[in-house]
Image (spheres, grey):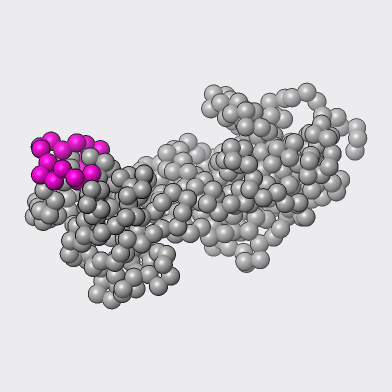
């Protein structure tokens, strides 16, 4: 047992210690740079990952809260709207009618970049509503639901215009803000047909103008638990304009 | 699900993710997020941090799926290693929230075997267990604590009440023995 002595650091030992996770932050940075630049070293690390893999089996599974997927979907801008939907002039006219020139300009840009959820552009024309501060498009992976959202910070008003998709008759859509590191906060329930204006102080925090929002399907009248319970049909992030 | 089928499905979905298929990312998430959340939660011991890291992991899956080489690694090992590494890096930044002594790090899930567990389980599992069992008792515990909690040599040494140098030598010896036992 004692005849095997640890030797001076070798690449294989460095790889094993990185894979095991016993080194300091600085040593981990070094190892990560080496993995990126030295395929042989990266191979040694992968081999140790495979050796340790059966241990992962012993770790109990824990179901993450639904909000994690909502945030991932929002961050990646899931999903591109179908071009057929977005090129329909009647739909976008209807969607933008409520918002004045600023939002309309933003939506035009958004149409030009259908894969981008965020709309980081100043309006091209003088705005009619100078207090409009943020715009966002919320859209879904599979379902047809999508919403154009504008935030008017001065008047503490969030306006939500459904672009496509109404909630099923026995369900409600519920709008949530997803604060980083906290549970979702409900902003209210809607049917997905009418433009909704919400008086809200919840979006007036320092990050309110870049808030991440999501829409879930809930029992009629809203989530019984105060947290999202149903599938997320649309999500996205506000962007200051 | 049959382990081989799960693995093939995961491989196929990762290929689709590499090609920009967002639905495939959700399929990968649905199949693996509970296991990966268990892994990161164990290391961070803080739900909010663990949720943040899990989000980062799947963002990385989205951007790095093209780097996954299914001829060289199993998909779940690749994903679990990414999750562990992200969680360990975060833990080094924020510190582990609650120190707790390790009893037996090999806590076994009592939630029944999922498709993913059967995917992970293989003859190498019992071989690794057998090889770890050949280590001295304290060294087995030290190795498992290091792996499951993602702790530094220094932390594990403190926990076991031995000098850091001693812990390094225990674990390095254990690693050499494990590699030899598993056939290099």
Picture coordinates of residue B87, whole percent (x, y): 58, 43
Residue A145: tell me if it is visible.
no
From this viewpoint, which residue is outermost toward the front? A154
Tell which of B164 and A159 is nearer to you: A159
Specify the quadrant that holds the C terminus of chain A: top left
Q: Magenta part of the protein: which range?
A: A110-133
Which quadrant of the view contains residue B88? top right
Specify the quadrant that holds the N terminus of chain A: top right
Picture coordinates of residue B35, whole percent (x, y): 57, 55
Picture coordinates of residue B136, whole percent (x, y): 86, 45
Which quadrant of the view contains residue A210? top left
Taking the spot 86% from the left edge, 32% from the top edge, the residue there is A4
Picture coordinates of residue B74, whole percent (x, y): 57, 45
Q: Is residue A240 above or below residue A158?
A: above
Taking the spot 25% from the left edge, 38% from the top edge, the residue there is A120
Tell which of A230 and A42 is nearer to you: A230
Instruction: Please tell me whether the stretch drawn in magenta is mainly helix, strand or loop.
Output: loop
Residue A25: tell me if it is visible.
yes
Taking the spot 79% from the left edge, 48% from the top edge, the residue there is B141
Taking the spot 45% from the left edge, 57% from the top edge, the residue there is A183
Tell which of A46 and A219 is nearer to you: A219
Which quadrant of the view contains residue A224? bottom left
From this viewpoint, which residue is outermost toward the bottom? A170
Would you say residue A167 sits in the magenta stretch?
no
């Amino acid at each position: 047992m004692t005849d095997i002595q640890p030797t001076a650091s070798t690449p294989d030992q460095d790889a094993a210690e990185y894979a095991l996770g016993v080194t300091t932050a600085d040593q981990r940075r070094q190892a990560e740079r080496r993995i990126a630049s030295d395929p042989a070293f990266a191979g040694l690390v992968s081999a140790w990952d495979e050796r340790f893999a059966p241990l992962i089996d012993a770790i109990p599974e824990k179901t993450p809260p639904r909000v994690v997927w909502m945030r991932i979907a929002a961050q990646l801008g899931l999903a591109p709207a179908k071009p057929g939907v977005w090129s329909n002039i009647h739909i976008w006219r209807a969607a933008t009618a409520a918002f004045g020139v600023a939002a309309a300009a933003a939506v035009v840009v958004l149409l030009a970049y259908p894969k981008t959820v965020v709309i980081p552009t100043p309006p091209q024309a003088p705005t009619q509503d100078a207090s409009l501060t943020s715009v966002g498009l919320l859209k879904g992976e599979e379902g047809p639901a999508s919403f154009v959202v504008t935030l008017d910070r001065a008047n503490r008003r969030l306006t939500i215009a459904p672009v496509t998709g109404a909630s099923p008759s026995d369900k409600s859509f519920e709008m949530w803000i997803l604060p980083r590191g906290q549970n979702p906060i409900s902003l209210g329930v809607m049917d997905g047909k009418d433009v909704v204006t919400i008086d809200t102080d919840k979006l007036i925090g320092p990050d309110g103008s870049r808030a991440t929002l999501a829409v879930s399907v809930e029992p009629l009248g809203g989530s019984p638990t105060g947290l999202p319970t149903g599938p997320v049909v649309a999500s996205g992030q506000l962007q200051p304009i | 699900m049959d382990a081989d089928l799960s693995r093939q499905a995961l491989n196929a979905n990762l290929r689709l993710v590499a090609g920009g298929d967002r639905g495939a990312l959700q399929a990968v998430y649905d199949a693996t997020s509970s296991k990966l959340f268990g892994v990161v939660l164990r290391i961070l011991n803080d739900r909010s941090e663990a949720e943040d890291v899990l989000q980062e992991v799947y963002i990385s899956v989205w951007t790095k799926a093209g780097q996954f080489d299914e001829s060289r690694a199993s998909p779940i090992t690749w994903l679990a290693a990414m999750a562990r590494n992200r969680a360990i890096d975060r833990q080094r930044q924020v510190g582990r929230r609650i120190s707790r002594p390790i009893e037996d790090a090999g806590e076994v899930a009592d939630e029944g075997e999922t498709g993913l567990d059967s995917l992970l389980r293989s003859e190498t599992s019992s071989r690794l267990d057998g090889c770890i069992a050949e280590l001295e008792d304290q060294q087995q515990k030290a190795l498992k604590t290091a792996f499951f909690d993602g702790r530094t040599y220094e932390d594990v040494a403190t926990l076991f009440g031995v000098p850091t140098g001693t812990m390094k030598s225990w674990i390095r010896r254990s690693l050499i023995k494990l590699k030899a036992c598993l056939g290099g």
